Image: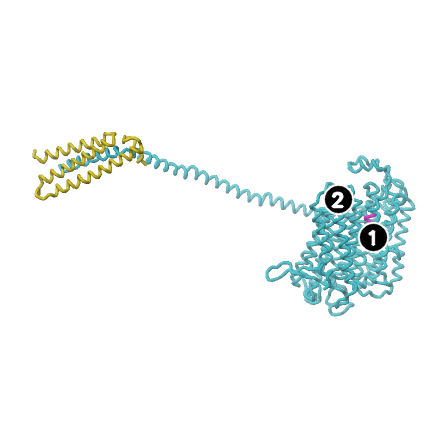
Chain colours: A cyan, B yellow
């Protein structure tokens, strides 16, 4: 066994140790905290690189490198629960991505959080998050994955609510936690069911794991309640966890609200890594999702499994709907958040229609350019004195040239600008696979529409933020009345936006370079990435016309956005949006996110509140009343007992004691201790005896 | 009045005097003397009943009294020793002060 496999646990353990040390160090130790966190991530990246190199040369029996290290964790009954980690291309790719992007974002955070007094706490949480995320990636057991998964959810909660003194941040943190919990319930159920069916939670265990052929054959033959295969049912339950974590319809509502956290957190957790964990989970359990009776029989032409169809549909719908919402948002981070939801939809769709390699390729490229975009937006927000509304920006191109250039690269990658940007290649792969999907063409159409919208809203955002003239200055003073703590000291600085320091721009440049270069690893003519992930690429036929088509779509979106927002720049911040003038009703619908939050408020939450009130009533009056009655009876009885005890038992006893004592007192008077007294008594008794004898004789 | 009655009367008188002395005297030595008087009254009764009894030839009464006197002498020695011990302890022979026997 390769030594790196044995020591793979070091990669998540390093940030965990760093988090522990930072947690106990004092607040002013900023340098220590930052260098520990970044150092652990950097070391993790080096180890990941070694792991990656180890997977490159060797090939396992199935044409793909895979080595596992399992160990017994705890025993219950006669069984051992096993945990373990696995090194395969999927793990290696994710490890590299997480540690690399994570390191850059950590470095960026030094600049962004420089003025925050809870700097060390921030790095502690970030490190903890990194540990959890890397744990998810290396896990070879669904249980270990679940543990890390929940750790990641916890740190997401902590970091969204990092500025917990803001009520909106606290509410967003709770919303994120509870919404993902709904999905995790499904994951937990799926896990339990999987254990019941296969008797193991290890993914790969030398032929005995639950993702390996024996277990799959056993499970696919059984049917669950509604006639679907057990694998499908378990797969769908696990997918529910992924839906929650990856912000898919209908559990996407938490992700845009999660932007209340510090922006590097949004970049790391809610764009690049954690939300991708759902996609990664589906990719990890892909053998379970994809298996059908047909595919086992070697019949490759059969329909894809139900689980994969669900994944595809959910992904396609999410990709489209989230893109439409993003069109009407004004908060720079919210646009990116909805874009993330939409791109995650693409990844899910990619997994559903094309398999692991296609979905994962988009995941990796997206991680880089979305981290870039978020960090760019952080730089913009930092430069604009904590303002996030794009209507109050504009013309930032000349104030922040580095940020503008890198942001433009990220935006073009996201929009899928042809040939030179990674997003183009990965998105095109998905559309190509969707085009060839045997079930329905609708996911393809939805994906194309989503691509158009993506190009459009990103152009809108860039046009409003970077082009035209700066609209923030005067409106900023008109908004001074707000009780924002920062407004006082920012107004002391210059009103002009300013470029960010090098500690923030250098990560942007590195990420921008990656956003361009990564795409060339997965072109249809040189599918290195797909080949590495063990997927033999299908025919490249029909790729070129499709590419031309998607290029046209992207150009249409870019042109439309340019024409509507850059050619006719808005003059003031309060002017209504161009689309709002044309169709106010639809625009309002989109701006309010299809009223998802309100609908949940009215249905699920109202039902929940009603149920809670009913429970409260039951608890307070029925159960509480019963308890109170019992307690009243008990108290009454105890009063009675006390009275009996005090006034009957004790008094009688006391009286008896008193009598005995008095008797004793009286008798002890006779006992004077004087010898002559006794003698006197004897003398008297003698006289009495004599008198008795004398008179007794006579009588 | 027969001769016996006279002796008995004398012995009763002697006993009464002894008893009165034993009861009324506060001095322990005088109380001991009272007790000796009562003992001698009893001895006198033994002699009288033997001398005027149905069988005066056998020397039983005399023997009895000699034993009794010997024992009384021993008892008096013990009593005097006790009194001396008490005196050493209490620096007094007043019987009213010796009331430690009560419970």
| Residue that badge 2 annotates | A30
Q: Secondary structure at mark 2?
A: helix
Kindly indicate the quadrant of the structure image that contains residue A496.
top right
What range is drawn magenta here? A368-376
Q: Toward the viewer: A68 or A231?
A: A68
Q: Quadrant of the N terminus of chain A?
A: bottom right
The reply to whether residue A50 is in sight is: yes
Mark 2 to mark 1 CA distance (whole Å): 29 Å
Badge 2 or badge 1: first in the primary sequence:
2
Q: Quadrant of the C terminus of chain A?
A: top left
Classed neighbour count for the residue bearing mark 2: other residues with Cα under 10 Å, few (<14), some (14–19), many (≥20): many
Q: Toward the viewer: A676 or A114?
A: A676
Query: Which residue appears farthest toward the right when viewing the image?
Result: A567
Is residue A628 a member of the stretch shown in magenta? Answer: no
Is residue A371 a member of the stretch shown in magenta? Answer: yes
In the rendered image, the vertical position of residue A262 relative to residue A445, given as above or below: above
| Residue that badge 1 annotates | A369
Give the main secondary structure, helix, strand or loop, of the magenta stretch.
helix
Q: Secondary structure at mark 1?
A: helix
The residue at the point 72 percent across, 53 percent down is A14
């Amino acid at each position: 066994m390769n030594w790196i496999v044995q020591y793979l646990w070091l990669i998540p353990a390093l940030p965990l140790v760093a988090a522990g040390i930072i947690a106990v160090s004092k607040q002013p130790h900023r340098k220590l905290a930052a260098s520990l966190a970044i150092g652990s991530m950097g070391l993790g990246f080096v180890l990941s690189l070694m792991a990656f190199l180890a997977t490159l040369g060797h090939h396992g029996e199935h044409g793909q490198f895979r080595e596992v290290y399992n160990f017994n964790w705890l025993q219950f009954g006669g069984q051992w629960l096993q945990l373990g980690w696995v090194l395969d291309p999927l793990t290696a790719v994710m490890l590299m991505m997480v540690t690399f992007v994570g390191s850059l974002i950590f470095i960026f955070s030094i600049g962004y959080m420089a003025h925050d007094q809870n700097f060390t706490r921030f790095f502690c949480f970030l490190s903890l998050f990194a540990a959890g995320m890397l744990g998810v990636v290396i896990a070879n057991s669904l249980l270990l994955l679940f543990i890390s998964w929940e750790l990641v959810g916890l740190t997401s909660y902590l970091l969204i609510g990092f500025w917990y003194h803001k009520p909106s941040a606290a509410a967003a943190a709770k919303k994120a936690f509870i919404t993902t919990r709904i999905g995790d319930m499904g994951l937990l159920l799926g896990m339990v069911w999987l254990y019941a069916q296969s008797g193991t939670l290890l993914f790969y265990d030398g032929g005995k794991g639950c993702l390996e052929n024996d277990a799959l054959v056993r499970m696919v033959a059984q049917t669950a309640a509604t006639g679907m295969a057990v694998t499908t049912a378990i797969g769908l339950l696990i997918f529910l966890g992924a839906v929650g974590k990856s912000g898919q319809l209908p559990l996407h509502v938490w992700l845009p609200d999660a932007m209340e956290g510090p922006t590097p957190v949004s970049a790391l957790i809610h764009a690049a890594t954690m939300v991708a964990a759902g996609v990664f989970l589906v990719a990890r359990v892909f053998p379970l999702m994809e298996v059908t009776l047909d595919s086992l029989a070697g019949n490759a032409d059969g329909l894809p499994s139900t689980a994969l169809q669900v994944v595809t549909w959910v992904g396609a719908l999410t990709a489209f709907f989230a893109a439409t919402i993003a069109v009407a948002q004004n908060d720079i981070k919210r646009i990116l958040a909805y874009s993330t939801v939409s791109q995650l939809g693409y990844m899910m769709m990619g997994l559903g229609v094309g398999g692991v390699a296609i979905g994962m390729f988009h995941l990796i490229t997206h991680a880089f350019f979305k981290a870039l975009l978020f960090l760019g937006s952080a730089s913009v927000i930092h430069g604009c004195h904590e303002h996030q509304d794009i209507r109050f920006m504009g013309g930032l191109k000349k104030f922040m040239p580095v940020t503008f250039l890198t942001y433009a690269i990220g935006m073009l990658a996201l929009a899928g600008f042809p040939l030179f940007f990674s997003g183009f290649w990965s998105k095109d792969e998905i559309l190509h696979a969707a085009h060839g999907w045997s079930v329905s063409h609708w996911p393809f159409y939805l994906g194309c529409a989503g691509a158009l919208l993506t190009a459009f809203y990103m152009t809108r955002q860039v046009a409003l933020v970077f082009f035209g003239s700066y609209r923030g200055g005067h409106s900023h003073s008109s908004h001074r009345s707000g009780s924002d703590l920062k407004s006082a000291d920012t107004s002391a600085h210059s009103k002009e936006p300013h470029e960010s320091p090098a500690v923030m721009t250098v990560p942007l440049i590195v990420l921008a370079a990656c956003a361009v270069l990564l795409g060339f690893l997965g072109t249809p003519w040189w599918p290195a990435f797909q080949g590495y992930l063990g997927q033999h690429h299908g025919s490249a036929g029909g790729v070129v016309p499709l590419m031309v088509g998607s290029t046209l779509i992207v150009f249409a979106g870019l042109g439309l956005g340019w024409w509507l927002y850059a050619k006719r720049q808005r003059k003031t911040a309060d002017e209504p949006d161009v689309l709002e003038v044309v169709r106010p009703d639809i625009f309002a619908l989109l701006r309010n996110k299809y009223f998802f939050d309100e609908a949940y408020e009215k249905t699920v939450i109202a039902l929940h509140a009603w149920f809670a009130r009913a429970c409260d009533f039951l608890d307070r009056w029925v159960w509480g009343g019963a308890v109170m009655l019992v307690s009243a009876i008990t108290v009454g009885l105890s009063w009675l007992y006390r009275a009996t005890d005090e006034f009957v038992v004790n008094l009688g006893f006391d009286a008896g004691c008193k009598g005995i004592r008095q008797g004793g007192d009286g008798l002890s008077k006779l006992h004077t201790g004087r010898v002559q007294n006794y003698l006197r008594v004897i003398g008297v008794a003698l006289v009495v005896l004599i008198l008795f004898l004398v008179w007794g004789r006579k009588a | 009045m027969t001769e016996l009655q006279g002796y008995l009367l004398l012995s009763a008188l002697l006993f009464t005097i002894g008893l009165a002395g034993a009861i009324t005297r506060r001095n322990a030595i005088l109380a001991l003397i009272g007790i000796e008087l009562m003992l001698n009254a009893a001895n006198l009764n033994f002699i009288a009943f033997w001398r005027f009894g149905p069988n005066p030839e056998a020397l039983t009464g005399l023997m009895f009294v000699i034993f009794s006197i010997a024992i009384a002498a021993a008892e008096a020695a013990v009593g005097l020793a006790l009194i001396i011990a008490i005196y050493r302890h209490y620096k007094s022979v007043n019987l009213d002060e010796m009331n430690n026997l009560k419970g």
